Image (cartoon, grey):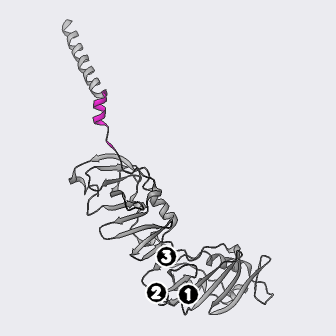
Amino acid sequence: MRYNVKIFGGIFFALLLIFIFIESPWTKKIRTPKKLKITDFKISEISKIEMKSKDKEFILVKKDNKWFLQVRDTIFLPTDSSRMDRTLKAFENLEGEVVGTNPKDFSLYQVDEENGLFIKAYNEKGKKLVDLIVGKMGPDFSSNYLRINGRNEIVLIEKYIRGDFPMYKGTWIDKRITNFKGEDVTKVIYNFGDNFVILKKDGKYYFENDTTKLDSIRTVGYIRMIGNLYAMDIIDTISPKDAGFFEPQGVIEIHLKDGSYNSIIFGNLGNEVYYVTNKNKKYVYTLTKSYVETAIKKKRDYFLGKEEAPSIIEPWKKKKFKK
């Protein structure tokens, strides 16, 4: 009997030691993954962002509280504001768990020179705020592996930020040629093949010096379309003169009720694209030839409902249907 008591007592004592060992603060500290805070600044402090992958490099700079994509030393293209907002927010409260410190694992998590996305951010005085190497997606779609450049800790953060730093020019630039409301338009001076002037009176549209009322659905639809023109691209390798803006093929002038106006200028025809600009902007945009000549270039009869309305589908918006 005493022998059994000793055995059970020994087992109980051993289990007690194991419990104490497992639940002790010291042991818990060993088991708990190390947390690492990566960013500790306000995103409003950022005035420059550098991004570099294996074969591409982009620089974003803030000038007069506006963000631009720096193409060369003296060329700055406007950025899409919503795109920039998402990118800047990616820097907020970055912290995560250290999942490794062995340099041999850098390639596994893609936080190495070959596969990583290098991201640096600076304040207006040129001080480096952060220097990261962003790697592959984490175990789920909302996490990411990264490493502070020059350090060995591989960190898993609970948000996927690599997608907030796309390495494509087209995703950064603001391609809006026009941005006005159709209901604010009071006058359209059209000079693109045909020549006429559209006036708005008492909510209805007429040709200048003509009492014939225009087809309201077509006219309103057309004005709304040209009030929200998006380009295919911004071309920074051609001058306004070479783009044909000094001797344009067409001009559409839009007057607004606040007294301002937009002048949409159609220059030379390039490789299946028109070079286009707005007098309120200094950039050379492109629109596809098919879109300009089918949707934008109209004859007087179109607005009277005497010309068939074409079906417009931009090439990049076409859907492929399976047979």
Describe residue 225's horizontal placement relative to residue 126 as left or right: right
Q: Amino acid at mark 3?
A: Trp
Secondary element under disc 2, as helix, strand or loop, is loop
Q: CA distance from mark 3 to mark 2?
A: 26 Å
How many C-alpha atoms fall within 10 Å of the one at disc 2: few (<14), some, or many (≥20)? few
Q: Amino acid at mark 2?
A: Ser
- Residues 64 and 227: in front is 64
Discs 3/1, front? 1
Discs 1/2, front? 2
Task: Name the residue beneath numbered marker 3.
Answer: 316
Between disc 3 and disc 1, whose residue precedes?
1
Q: Which mark is residue 266?
A: 1
Image point (22%, 50%), residue name? 102
Q: CA distance from mark 1 to mark 2?
A: 14 Å
Q: CA distance from mark 3 to mark 1?
A: 21 Å
Task: Name the residue beneath numbered marker 2.
Answer: 239
Secondary element under disc 1, as helix, strand or loop, is strand
Between disc 1 and disc 2, whose residue precedes?
2
Q: Is residue 314 visible?
A: yes
Q: Which mark is residue 149?
A: none
Secondary element under disc 3, as helix, strand or loop, is helix
Discs 3/2, front? 2
Highlighted magenta segment, given as a residue range: 23-37
Image point (48%, 59%), residue name? 86
Q: Is residue 164 above or below residue 293?
A: above
Is 50 in the magenta?
no
The picture quadrant where one finds residue 75 is bottom left
Q: Residue 16: x percent and y percent? A: 27, 20
Between disc 3 and disc 2, whose residue precedes?
2
Q: Is residue 103 above or below residue 243?
A: above
